[in-house]
Image (spheres, helix red, strand yellow):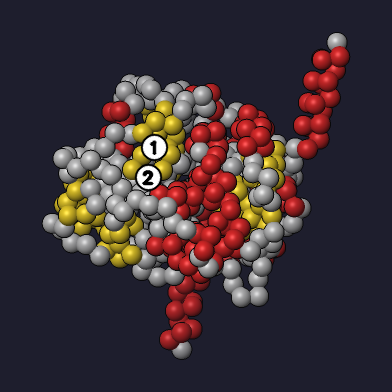
Amino acid sequence: MAFTLLKELKHLTEIKEVKTFKHGIHPNDYKHYTKDLPIERMPFVDEYVLPLSQHAGAPSKPIVKPGDYVYRGQLIAEPAAFVSAALHAPVTGWVKAIEPREHPGGKISEAIVIERDPHSPQTLLNEHPIDWENLRPKEILEIIRLGGFVGLGGAAFPTHVKYAVPEGKHAKYFFVNAAECEPFLTTDYRIMLERYDSIFLGIRIILKLLGSEKAFIGTETNKWDAIELLRSLKPDDIPVEIIPLETKYPQGAEKMLIEAVVHREVPSGRLPIDVEVVVNNVGTVAAIGDIFQYNQPLIERVVTVTGPGIRRPANLLVPIGTPLTAIIEYCGGMTDNVRQVLFGGPMMGIPQRTLDVPILKGTSGVLFLTDYEVVPRQEYPCVHCMKCVDACPMYLNPSLLGMLARVRRYEDMLEHHVMDCIECGSCSYVCPSNIPLVQRFRVAKTLLREQMARERAKEKKA
């Protein structure tokens, strides 16, 4: 009796400490496919395709040519601008070509193609620890820049740009985003359970780099075992707190995470650093720990291969550039009724028009959906139920924005803050009329950005 009462009191305490944001939705998380599957290394394949554009900003600039022999971890393309990222060989072998190839984003992109050397042991080029404790912050930042790091949660924004805090700004808090609110995906969850040493090392290094006074690791309560594990293993000398978050979508959006934990709202058109916060995905933090522990740049990542349409779901450690077809074969093939393949999760993932695409730095998962999940739905007129308004985490009016988008009044959409839309898809999810709201907003934002770019170009000429 007493034991039961203590257990109930502990549960009530846990509920009280759970944090969240206002609005959002509660889709089924579908984590059961892969949450209990340890990370396994994907075997090396014969050919790797590395698009030069697999991050936000300018494409990488090749520094190798066809016929060159390259080693695993060797720099093969350098950042072409401040907002750009370096690219490294994921395997030892020969540069077969630099040519246009299919890109998961739906376009054709210039890519470096590497043919693996079957006789190489595929050991890492120049493996050794880096003495980060005796480095200055600028030197740490340069190692991260040349390591090719980007946000591994999906956005693939170059990490060194985030860490380059502008003059006059201060990163009081560093947030490790491990919410992983997207259904089906378990990449971050398995990293927390299996690579906690790299996470804590990465936090140590980043706190020194940013000069932050405290770090937070935020993860949802459907990963409570990971929360308890990190709390039990947390080194006493690191100012880091593990924060349980309500299991709610889009809890992993950085603005929602900041609001939930420190109750600060990032102003419209501004960035987290404007409220003294820097946010990075937990996989990126672990990878930064690895470069200082092993001198390993970003040449591989954990990918959740999941869904009812794949015969053997898995959490795989995959070299960047691995063909999707090789992953499908390794996981036992697709079921006969696969209707859609997504890079990412069902809410924000990118549908693939071909299987002839490679894994990118930002590929958090590959989701295989069948004709049972992907059912064409008829669109009906808006009934003004305002469910989308209640769901929107950015406090927008998706119903109004959707009507403006339908008649192509894109400039009017600017007045109603369409550029603040984080494209989470919550509005589309709850819409009883099946209106593809988020898809329309994406089109509108793209056209508006193009228009603004043209106007800036005209002003420069004038």
Q: Is residue 122 above or below residue 413?
A: above
Which amino acid lies under the numbered mark 1 shown in the image of this protein? Answer: Leu
Q: Nearer the viewer, residue 195 or 414?
A: 195
Which residue lies at the image location 44% right of the left edge and 31% below the top edge? 39
Write down the residue under mark 1: 317
Q: Nearer the viewer, residue 408 or 429?
A: 429
Outermost residue on the bottom side: it is 462
Residue 117 drawn at (x, y percent) = 17, 44
Which residue lies at the image location 60% right of the left edge and 48% below the top edge? 176
Report the side of 134 relative to 382 (left or right). left
Q: Quadrant of residue 80?
A: bottom left
Q: Kindly check if marks 2 and 1 are in contact, taking CB atoms under 8 A apart as contact.
A: yes
Q: Would you call the spot at circle 2 few (<14 residues within 10 Å), some (14-19), or many (20 or more)?
A: many
* Label 1 secondary element: strand
Q: Quadrant of residue 83?
A: bottom left
Outermost residue on the left side: it is 67
Q: Nearer the viewer, residue 260 or 165?
A: 165
Q: CA distance from mark 2 to mark 1?
A: 7 Å
Which residue lies at the image location 41% right of the left edge and 43% below the top edge? 301
Q: Which mark is residue 122?
A: none
Write down the residue under mark 2: 300
Please say whether residue 421 is visible from this viewpoint: no
Which amino acid lies under the numbered mark 2 shown in the image of this protein? Answer: Glu
Residue 106 drawn at (x, y percent) = 35, 49
Please say whether residue 329 is visible from this viewpoint: yes
Q: Would you call the spot at circle 1 few (<14 residues within 10 Å), some (14-19), or many (20 or more)?
A: some
